[in-house]
Amino acid sequence: MPEVQPPASDVQLIPVNASRRRFVFVGLAGAAVLAGARWLMPSAPTGGSAPAGLTTEAADIVRALAPALLDGALPDDAAERDDAITRTVAAVGAAIEGLPPATREELATLFALLAAMPVRIFVAGVGGAWRDATVADANGFLVRLQKSRWSVKRSAYDALHQLTFAAWYADPRAWPAIGYPGPPALL
Amino acid sequence: MTATAETRIPDPVRDGLARGWSVVDATTLREDVTLETDVAIVGTGAGGGIAAEMLADAGLRVLLIEEGPLRSSRDFRMRESDAYRDLYQESAARKTADKAINILQGRCVGGGTTVNWTSSFRTPVTTLAHWQATYGLRGFDEPDLAPWFARVEERLGIAPWTVAPNANNASLARGAGKLGIGWGTIRRNVRDCWNLGYCGLGCPTNAKQSMLVTTIPHALDRGATLVPRARALRLVLRGDVVDSLECAAMDASGTAPSKRRIRVRARLFVAAAGAIGSPALLLRSNVPDPYAQIGIRTFLHPTVVSAALMPERVDGFAGAPQTVYSDHYLDSMPIDGPVGFKLEAPPVHPVLAAITLPSHGSTHAAWMKRLPHMQVLIALLRDGFHPDSAGGRVRLARDGTPLLDYTLTPYLFEGARRAMVAMAELQFAAGATSVMPVHDEGDGYASLGAARAAISEFDLRPRATTVVSAHVMGGCAIGPDPRRAVVDETGRHHHLGNLYVVDGSLFPTSIGANPQLSIYAIAAKLATGIAGRLRT
């Protein structure tokens, strides 16, 4: 597996699929790293355990970050909590399937970056496997993304924020806790 | 929705289909087809809908191409879980190229009018005067447009809203009253509105007089053809005219074009795909553009948000979403001075609130748990009137889809900072116990002094400051001078004889108010001219 090169300049050409002579032209060093990660880890087909719209690796990441994003919103009971997270991961996958191809590709690139071990240490500051990340690990990772002045990391935070919160609060099971009665019945 | 509701609320779309409307869902096509018509209209929103009705009434054969699906009141379940995915561009997550601005834009039959919040303002006189003085636009001053406004207002039931505002909007009125600044009630395009508050998710009772239930059914009853779930790929040129329009049926997911092609031959073509879609169609078509005007000066009314907690319940998810506004911060400064802003209140539904509130974890959860007490204001910046506010630029991604570059300039951020202070001031005046200007560094502040001090220290920059938009305008400017405009004052392309633009992309600047009524009136004026031309 080739090493990921740290960005050398603000503009790079990164071959994505050299056999088809296809190149990604990116104007940001950060995006170049993402593209490199994608090349490093071509998007695996959806695994048996992953919901539609997510690779196994991506599902692991969403599952690892959801407890930090939704801290304070998830149920306390361990079994209910696990079930709620599983539903959220599935809903994130479904939402991704409804996005345009270019956006899906960007997200696949983002998840490939996060899944690629060497890159994870380099960018995210979380050691070990995503499956083993604690809520504190996940929160620390998210805060680093959020506070980053690096455009692409900040965008990654926004994407994870938007996908996870939309998945969670679209679900009627999240409504009682926030006092939302749901839409009125048209009787 | 229950069977009772289904039988009780008439569904004009389903009824029309039963009557035999000519509607061809492109995803059902089994082979490539060629369609012939007098007028092909790309897009079914405010511009395309009005044009379709008027041209059909003129006895012309009309064909409408729409990338989104045909949905109707029976599908509108008031659920954010399906409405954003089904009815909005990019599942309501469309963004500027740098991802700094989230853009709410419709993508369904009826376009933005199916999902907008019904706010109906005539184009401000100051805006029209600026167009005349700065761009030499003739025929669009207040007396010229007044009859067109009157006509579309009558057609779409646009009238003062006499029901009491919901608490979210009442707070805006109360705060403005306490501060002694001007405010008013918003006219709405509704008939027999149930005051439910779910306009943004598709009106379940057909009270909203969107294109979906007014002009498009009318045109279809007059023999027009509607082709939903087809993307207009490019105009095919022959000399100085458009010969045909090449479209792709969308694939089953509705997110990408399939290989199935639809060719449309017509005497005249109307781009009405909105202020991102229309410039993109013209760019993909390589239409003549000697002065590089296509796609530039695209405006958004960049919008900043302030959330407050009230002691009483607000229930901002219930009741007509926008009924009160204040133009104090537009009217109190020159249009070409420091950027002015319009104050309004948005609907406060769980997903919209959750994705807009900053941060995550317990901070975020604590605000969400007080959703029923949350009062939200938005400030819409009037972009496009100052040299430091030249708007954005639509360009094409490698796959031909549009990207919008939009720079949030220091000029705009200065206005954003003033707007955050103004909103906090108004919310405290209305009785808020805590105000959170929506920004990364924003927290809940218990006093105006604390909020003001914090806002003055905010590092306002793209992505750290939450900026949203629900109004996309410009990019195919109308005007007499081909060096500064894409179409002439009849809406006709400056270099192609049978191509017109009839939508919000015509505007030389932003409107400075919710744009739907401006689009309706100008579309009615231009469509009347087109009909006259084709009849002779």
Image (cartoon, rainbow, N blue to C red):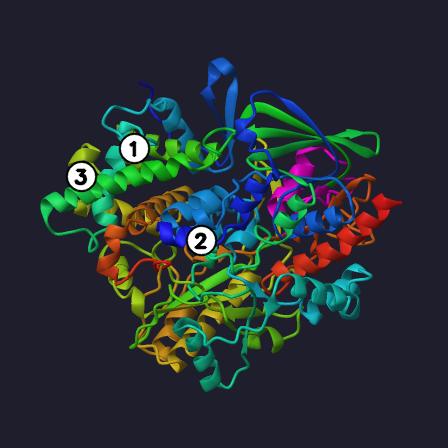
- Tell me which residue sits at (28%, 54%) in the image: B360
Single out the mark in the foreground, 2 or 3. Answer: 2
Q: Is residue B385 visible?
A: no
Q: Which residues are magenta?
A: B270-298
Q: Position of residue B51 (x, y in %)?
A: 71, 49
Q: Residue at x 49, y 37 (%)?
A: A10
Q: Chain of mark 1?
A: A
Checking the image for residue B24, the label placed there is none
Q: Quadrant of residue A151?
A: top left
Secondary element at image label 1: helix
Q: Nearer the viewer, residue B394 or A45?
A: A45
> Which kind of residue does numbered mark 3 sit on?
Ala
Circle 2 — which element? Answer: helix
| Pointer 3 chain | A
Side (left or right) of B286 relative to A18? right
- What is the count of numbered marks? 3
**In front: B286, or A145?**
B286
| Viewer-side residue, B163 vs A1 | B163
Mark-to-mark CA distance, 1 and 3: 14 Å
Q: Which mark is residue A133?
A: 3
Which residue lies under the disc numbered 2? B201
Which quadrant holds the C terminus of chain A? Answer: bottom left
